[in-house]
Image: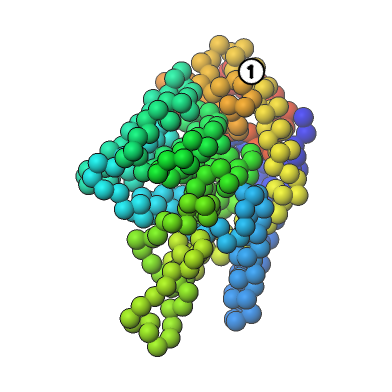
Amino acid sequence: MKALIDKKDFIGLDRCSWFYSGAETPTHRGVLEAITEYLTARSLGPGGRERNAEKEWRCKQNLARMLNGSPDQIALMSSSSEIISMIAQAMRLKPGDNVIIHNLEFPSGVLPWLLLKQDGVEVRVVEHRQWDIDEEDILNQIDDRTRLVLTSHVSYLNGVRIDYQKLYERVSRTNALFVLDATQSFGAFSVDINHADLIVCSTYKWLLGVHGGGILAINPKRGFELMPRYIGWRSVRSSTGRNKFETFEFHSDARRFELGYPSYPTIYALEFTTGLLLEIGVERIAEHILKLGDSVLELLSSLGLTITTPTEPHRRAGNISFLSDDAERIASELYKQGIYLMGGDGRVRISIGAFNDSDDIRNLGEILPKI
């Protein structure tokens, strides 16, 4: 299979096989140009600020198209960790309330709730079943004191893809909000804001962007009821005027969660990469990833490795993992051979992106058995 995005368009892909997208993606040359454009705009004074505002709006438009929503539902912040922590504070949870997560969740989706345990909030952790998460196990934990259910769309640990639409259909009938962390899927697989109350995502993985950005998408059906416990000049309708020392009014849309100026280099990069992904088509990218994933699963199975990623296409995405007590060493040795992947947490993770091709899989198949 050929890559969907030419490897020559990325810096460094001529010297490696990149299976590291679950951590971060290589730099597209268009991203370098976009960030240079931002730096050039800085020299334009007021004209540069106008350019920044235009790029930010176009970036939100692209994200909204990908999420099947509208730009007013998008807030651009600094990271997924920041966003989830701020959601936790905005929830205003009381003693006896509970939140539901599972044990294949990334720490940013766990720690903010553990912090609230000191305030009497119960954290219910659903256990995986043979490295898969049964949505019914999550739903069965909900009661009349459940205030929030959070899951990643795709697990960072083993790549299981959760049926979030099934979860939302049931959670939306309760008093609990449903938060979806799409960091390990958005840009490679379809994500729809109409099947979650809040969607959180980082910018530097499958979206092909750079560090410094976090995306918050809000479903207005229930999500706009959430009010921040923090505030900045960009959160409000106006921070000037005669009454600025007496009162304020939050924006009625997702902008209420934005504090001050965002990372414009990140936004310039993201405006470019989201445009590229829309041009290629996310469904096409997903099909490409799943087909290459079939070859990776076949390779790992032939080596007798214990695969923790579901083999069914509808239960996996770009991350494929196998168990190893020697994961860090394996990843380090492969790195020396020009194969970039993640080793840690007792597993080796192979992440497949739109720029991967059959040559990458053959390269992995030649070198991995020798490690």
User: Which residue is rendered at x = 49% and y = 47% of the image?
Assistant: 197
Q: Quadrant of residue 144?
A: top left
Q: Secondary structure at mark 1?
A: helix
- Residue 17: tell me if it is visible: no
Relative to the observer, which residue lies in front, 270 or 7? 270
228 is higher (above) or lower (below) than 16: below
User: Could you tell whether 13 is left or right of 325 in the image?
Assistant: right
User: Which residue is rendered at x = 42% and y = 25% of the image?
Assistant: 137
**Residue 29 drawn at (x, y percent):** 69, 53
- Residue 171: tell me if it is visible: yes
Please name the colour scheme applied to the rendered image.
Answer: rainbow
User: Which residue is rendered at x = 31% and y = 40% of the image?
Assistant: 145
**Residue 272 drawn at (x, y percent):** 68, 57
User: Could you tell whether 182 is left or right of 50 in the image?
Assistant: left
Q: Residue furthest right?
A: 2
User: Which residue is rendered at x = 59% and y = 81% of the image?
Assistant: 45
Q: Residues within 10 Å of mark 1 (few under 14, many from 20)?
A: some
Relative to the observer, which residue lies in front, 160 or 305? 160
Q: Residue furthest bottom?
A: 242
**Residue 276 drawn at (x, y percent):** 72, 51
The N terminus sits in image quarter: top right
The C terminus sits in image quarter: top right
**On the image, numbered disc 1 is attached to which residue?**
299
